[in-house]
Amino acid sequence: MGDYSEFGLKIRATLAVYRWQRIDPMPWAELGRPVAEANVALVSTAGLALPGQALFDDGVKGGDFSFREVPSSTDPQCLVESHRSDAFSRDGLAEDRNLVFPIDRMHELEREGAIGRFNARCISFMGSITAPRRLMLETAPRAAEILVGDGVDVALLVPV
């Protein structure tokens, strides 16, 4: 695991004074079936969108708290990245979107029987949201409603 020394001075200074959100108690739900029988959705904070979808807006104060729906049939390499953070290298992301949005790996798990079904749609958020209140009160519940409506049992969260 890395530490703050990996970041430049600007990022280290920001992290030193940032007021982290605490969620207590942490919401939790027991899985009611084996993962090999579950409908699994992919949720990432990589800031990816389909060509033609609106990109995430780096001008939103506190971070763009919206999300994009991405069909699980999408070729991940066609996804457009618009994550606002400069705290990570995009080299690997440019080479293989599966690093942050593992659609191909999810299809492999489904074919191998490790998961019951890969949900027909994925959810893409932008990470680096420094003011998460709107995300927690508005957007995340809407995304959760979509996944519940799809009959999702498990969401694989891929933070970026």
Image: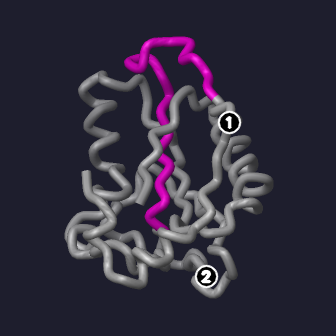
Looking at the image, is mark 2 or mark 1 earlier in the sequence? 1
Front-most of 18 and 125?
Answer: 18
Q: In which quarter of the image is the C terminus?
A: bottom left
Horizontal side of residue 118 vs 20, given as left or right: left
Q: Is residue 41 magenta?
A: yes
- Residue pointed to by mark 2: 57
Residue 42: horizontal and vertical position, in percent?
A: 47, 45
- Residue pointed to by mark 1: 24
Q: Residue at x 67, y 66 (%)?
A: 66
Residue 1 is at least partly visible in this image: yes
Q: Which of marks 2 and 1 is in front?
A: 1
Q: Residue at x 55, y 53 (%)?
A: 123
Residue 131: horizontal and vertical position, in percent?
A: 68, 68
Q: Residue at x 50, y 49 (%)?
A: 43
Q: Relative to 105, is 74 above or below?
A: below
- Tell me the crowding category of disc 2: few under 14, some 14 to 19, or many 20 or more residues within 10 angstroms, Cα based: some
Front-most of 4 and 57?
Answer: 4
Q: Relative to 112, is 77 above or below?
A: below
Magenta residues?
28-47
How far apart are labels 2 and 1 at the CA level? 30 Å
Q: Is mark 2 on a helix, strand or loop?
A: loop
Find residue 149 and report its image quarter. Answer: top right
Q: Relative to 12, is 96 above or below?
A: above
- Tell me the crowding category of disc 1: few under 14, some 14 to 19, or many 20 or more residues within 10 angstroms, Cα based: few
